[in-house]
Image (spheres, helix red, strand yellow):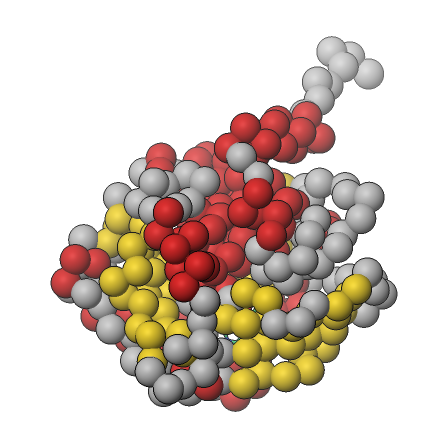
């Protein structure tokens, strides 16, 4: 049931209406693996950092069962750096700085021990890098999921479409779904995008939950109404990590189980936004998570009157 994630391991600097951080640890790969570690005791990552990346965070990942043999540490080079500022609505943000550094020439090398991967999570990276990982696995995994963003649609649409044709699940937000499909209606967008390859499509709608499309079926998962959202950075990656971690742990890729996996991802994402960066994810327990999943179940469970 090997779960493999490829994704950025990064430094971020974040500004929200609540405050501002210096360089803190971020990166899609970091959020994804932290989130999936609540479900799987062992997993792997393919990523790259510079010499400046703190050993303490690598130790945290190792202690949570993340095999780092596919993590390259580039001597004399700097870790990927991203900085963003959120608007007052906390749903939209501006990217202030993107320093690719080690990501610029990233060649995702797979150790031999990663070849038995059953579940592959392609975090937001260039579609060429994402495709290389699929191609370098001798046997196709049971399930390949992929995240992407408008940045790649703007500069590498053809490459993106090629990679998209090779995956099973695409996880994107509503704005990205509209851009990718040229359709405003998310139902129409979902049809167009699934014609591009992925049999399953998850559209995240931030504080308004997430939709799962497959065949003629649609499942909607709410987001937990929170009094304060402190920092949404990494919520999407955390969602994806929870989703894939749950599927890998249960080794069941039926539509019914994907519904549960979406709730698992949503619950973890609701913790992620409560503090800056990865802090909240590293302090909560499995019991905290289970309680929150129960809150999600209660949020939309009801019994219809017998007659009306
Ligand atoms: P999210 O808020 O889920 O979109 O993810 C934010 C994380 O993505 C941050 O921790 C960043 O380090 C990382 N990130 C931002 N831009 C990129 C990019 N172009 N390539 C890879 N990772 C990125």
Residue found at the far top of this picture: 306
Q: Position of residue 158 (x, y in %)?
A: 43, 84
Nearest to the observer: residue 256 or residue 240: 240
Left or right of residue 35: residue 47: left
Left or right of residue 157: residue 23: right
Nearest to the observer: residue 201 or residue 206: 206
Left or right of residue 197: residue 84: right
Q: Position of residue 168 (x, y in %)?
A: 38, 57
Give the residue drawn at x 30%, y 80%: 107
Left or right of residue 286: residue 301: right
Ligand 1 is located in which of the four quadrants? bottom right
Nearest to the observer: residue 270 or residue 183: 270
Give the residue drawn at x 70%, y 68%: 21
Give the residue drawn at x 36%, y 41%: 40
The answer to whether residue 146 of the structure is visible from this angle is no
Q: Work out which quarter of the rendered image holds the N terminus and state it.
A: top left
Nearest to the observer: residue 222 or residue 226: 226
140, above or below 150, in the image: above
Give the residue drawn at x 55%, y 78%: 81
């Amino acid at each position: 049931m090997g779960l493999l994630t490829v994704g950025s391991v990064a430094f971020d600097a974040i500004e929200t209406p609540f405050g501002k951080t210096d360089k803190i640890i971020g990166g899609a790969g970091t959020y994804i693996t932290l989130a999936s570690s609540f479900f799987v005791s062992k997993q792997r990552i393919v990523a790259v950092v510079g010499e400046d990346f703190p050993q303490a965070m690598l130790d945290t990942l190792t202690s949570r069962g993340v095999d780092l043999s596919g993590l390259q540490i580039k001597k004399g080079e700097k870790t990927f750096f991203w900085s963003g500022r959120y608007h007052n609505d906390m749903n939209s943000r501006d990217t202030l700085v993107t320093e690719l550094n080690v990501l610029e020439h990233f060649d995702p090398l797979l150790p031999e021990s990663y070849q038995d991967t059953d579940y592959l999570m392609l975090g937001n990276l260039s579609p060429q890098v994402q495709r290389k990982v699929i191609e370098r696995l001798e046997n196709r995994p049971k399930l390949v999921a992929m995240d992407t963003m408008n940045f790649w649609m703007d500069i590498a649409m053809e490459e993106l479409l090629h990679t998209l044709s090779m995956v099973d699940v695409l996880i994107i937000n509503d704005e990205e779904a509209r851009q990718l499909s040229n359709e405003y209606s998310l139902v129409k967008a979902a049809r167009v995008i699934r014609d591009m390859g992925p049999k399953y499509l998850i559209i995240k709608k931030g504080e308004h939950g997430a939709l799962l499309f497959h065949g003629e079926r649609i499942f909607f998962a709410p987001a937990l109404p929170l009094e304060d959202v402190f920092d949404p950075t990494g919520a999407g990656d955390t969602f994806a990590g929870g989703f894939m971690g749950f599927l890998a742990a249960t080794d069941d890729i039926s539509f019914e189980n994907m519904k549960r996996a979406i709730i698992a991802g949503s619950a973890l994402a609701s913790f992620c936004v409560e503090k800056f960066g990865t802090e909240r994810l590293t302090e909560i327990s499995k019991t905290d998570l289970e309680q929150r999943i129960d809150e999600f179940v209660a949020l939309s469970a009801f019994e219809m009157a017998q007659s009306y």
